Image (cartoon, rainbow, N blue to C red):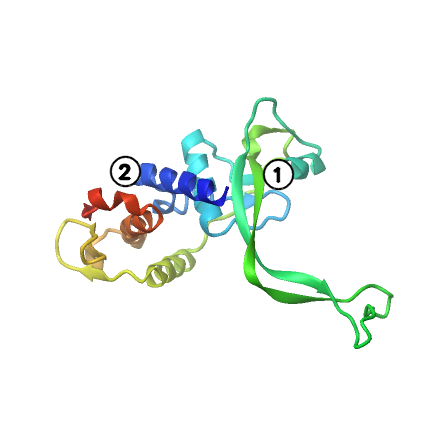
């Protein structure tokens, strides 16, 4: 299942790169409201590949609501997934486990209130878990969405810089009118930063080109057609 999930996500990313609608190209809305997918119950943003995947699904299906939830979570809100709606598979890794603490004699250690004490231990191999989530627009009776303001410019620019740095892909800046990824050198060529009208446009372009590198890493069979990606 993990392989199928990765292939599905990768295929979606490739398609949206080709169409110029990759979800990371515009990680904030012109309206000033965030649309990073988040869980309707916990309020936490989805991370990594799950965030990209849910943004891609929202783009494909035209969802404007950034909230997602499992079937049971929807029921806890007195809401119900509408008949015929299909959920979206996500996966996450569990790197730590919660185990009961025992004393030297192997007896359970309890706190002052008589409850079992637990500790967190790192797993030798992360465990993969799957969940099926539904967008709020697939659910009847969902509470009205509360506005979540977009990140301040300095916050999103700092996040973009971190993503660029973590990619490990060299970025070459040259005066010109083209931005592209070159497979042979595994690098991105960009116009000078000063040539972009806004910082947002610079970062969206840079992340788009870095997306071509991610595309090849996920789906190496595309190497033949990716000598020069723009």
Q: Position of residue 157 (x, y in %)?
A: 37, 58
User: Quick check: can you spot residue 230?
Assistant: no
Q: Are marks 2 and 1 in contact (CB under 8 Å)?
A: no
Give me the disc on residue 18.
2
The secondary element bearing badge 2 is classed as helix
Picture quadrant where residue 170 is located: bottom left
Q: Residue furthest front?
A: 105
CA distance for labels 2 and 1: 31 Å
Q: How many marks?
A: 2
The residue to which callout 1 is attached is 70
Rendered residue at 28%/44% (across/down): 221
Q: Quadrant of the C terminus?
A: top left
Rendered residue at 52%/49% (across/down): 46
Rendered residue at 42%/38% (across/down): 8
Q: Residue furthest left?
A: 176
Q: Position of residue 45 (x, y in %)?
A: 53, 50
Picture quadrant where residue 161 is located: bottom left
Is residue 106 rendered to the left or right of residue 131? right
Picture quadrant where residue 86 is located: top right
The secondary element bearing badge 1 is classed as loop
Q: Upstream in the sequence, badge 2 or badge 1?
A: 2
Q: Position of residue 129 (x, y in %)?
A: 58, 48
Mark 2 Cα within 10 Å, few/some/many (few <14, many 20+)? few
Mark 1 Cα within 10 Å, few/some/many (few <14, many 20+)? some
Q: Position of residue 89 (x, y in %)?
A: 52, 39
């Amino acid at each position: 299942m993990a392989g199928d999930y990765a292939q599905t996500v990768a295929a979606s990313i490739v398609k949206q790169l080709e169409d110029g609608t990759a979800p990371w190209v515009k990680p904030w809305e012109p309206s000033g409201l965030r649309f990073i997918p988040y869980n309707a119950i916990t309020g936490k943003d989805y991370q990594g590949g799950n965030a990209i995947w849910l943004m891609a699904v929202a783009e494909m299906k035209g969802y404007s609501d950034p909230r997602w939830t499992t079937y049971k979570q929807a029921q806890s809100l007195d809401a119900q997934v509408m008949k015929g709606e299909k959920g979206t598979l996500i996966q996450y890794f569990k790197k730590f486990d919660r185990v009961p603490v025992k004393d030297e004699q192997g007896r359970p250690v309890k706190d002052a209130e008589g409850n079992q004490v637990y500790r967190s231990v790192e797993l030798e191999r992360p465990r993969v878990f799957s969940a099926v989530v539904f967008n709020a627009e697939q659910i009847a009776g969902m509470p009205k969405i509360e506005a979540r303001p977009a990140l301040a410019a300095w916050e999103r620019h700092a996040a973009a810089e971190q993503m660029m740095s973590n990619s490990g892909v060299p970025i070459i800046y040259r005066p010109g009118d083209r931005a592209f990824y070159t497979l042979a050198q595994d690098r991105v060529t960009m116009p000078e930063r000063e040539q972009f009208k806004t910082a947002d446009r610079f970062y969206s372009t840079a992340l788009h080109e870095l997306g071509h590198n991610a595309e090849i890493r996920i789906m190496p069979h595309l190497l033949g057609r990716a000598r020069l990606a723009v």
